[in-house]
Image (spheres, helix red, strand yellow):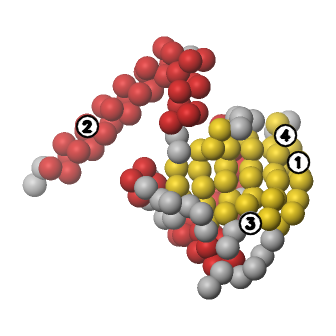
Amino acid sequence: MALPLEVLADLQLAVDGEDIDIRGTGDRIVVDLPSLRAGRRLLASGPFASGQRARTTGRVHEALHISGLTVEVRLRGDPVARLGADAQPGAVGRFLNLDGVELQPVRPLRAALRRRPVLAAVVIGGLLVGLGWWFFRRREP
């Protein structure tokens, strides 16, 4: 049974000179990142920095779910991840061993493709090669 928690907040956190907006609107906490670098720095300095990131993520998801709260992470306004009560984890989260995290990478990837098409093509090509190698290695006896 979810506890009736409500978070009302309007915060701004500076990480390496970049402002991260955090808003609580009742049962939803929205973290809006200005860049991937800011998000990476934020994760590296918090409870997810430890070597047991998957375990920590599972615990945070469970606590949020019990309390009826949802944390939504956005990148320049586009939702990229959701954790907690309203999260609907999918294959991408399971593949990355992120227990309870709903990942939505499509919109930010499209924006990156438009901004830097050559770099995006190289990264996507590398990911495809890496996935192919991983699947090939799994099939070997």
Residue that label 4 marks: 19
Contact (Cβ within 8 Å) of mark 1 with mark 2? no
Q: Residue furthest left?
A: 141
Residue that label 2 marks: 132
**Which amino acid, mark 3?**
Asp
- What residue appears at the point 87 percent right and 63 percent down from the top-left corner? 8
Contact (Cβ within 8 Å) of mark 1 with mark 4? yes
Nearer-the-camera pick, 90 or 20 = 90
Per the model, the C-alpha gap separating discs 1 and 2 is 41 Å
Circle nearer the N terminus (1, 4): 1
Per the model, the C-alpha gap separating discs 3 and 1 is 19 Å
- Which of the 4 image quarters holds residue 63? bottom right
Q: How many neighbours does mark 1 have within 10 angstroms: few (below 14), some (14-19), or many (20 or more)?
A: some
**Which amino acid, mark 2?**
Gly
Circle nearer the N terminus (1, 2): 1
Residue 45 position in % (x across, y down): 73, 54
- What residue appears at the point 53 percent right and 31 percent down from the top-left corner? 109
Residue that label 3 marks: 27
Using the image, determine if residue 5 lies above or below residue 125. below
Circle nearer the N terminus (2, 3): 3
Per the model, the C-alpha gap separating discs 4 and 3 is 23 Å
Circle nearer the N terminus (4, 3): 4
**Which amino acid, mark 4?**
Asp
**Which amino acid, mark 1?**
Gln
Residue 71 position in % (x across, y down): 68, 59
Residue that label 1 marks: 12
Mark 1: secondary structure: strand
Q: How many neighbours does mark 2 have within 10 angstroms: few (below 14), some (14-19), or many (20 or more)?
A: few
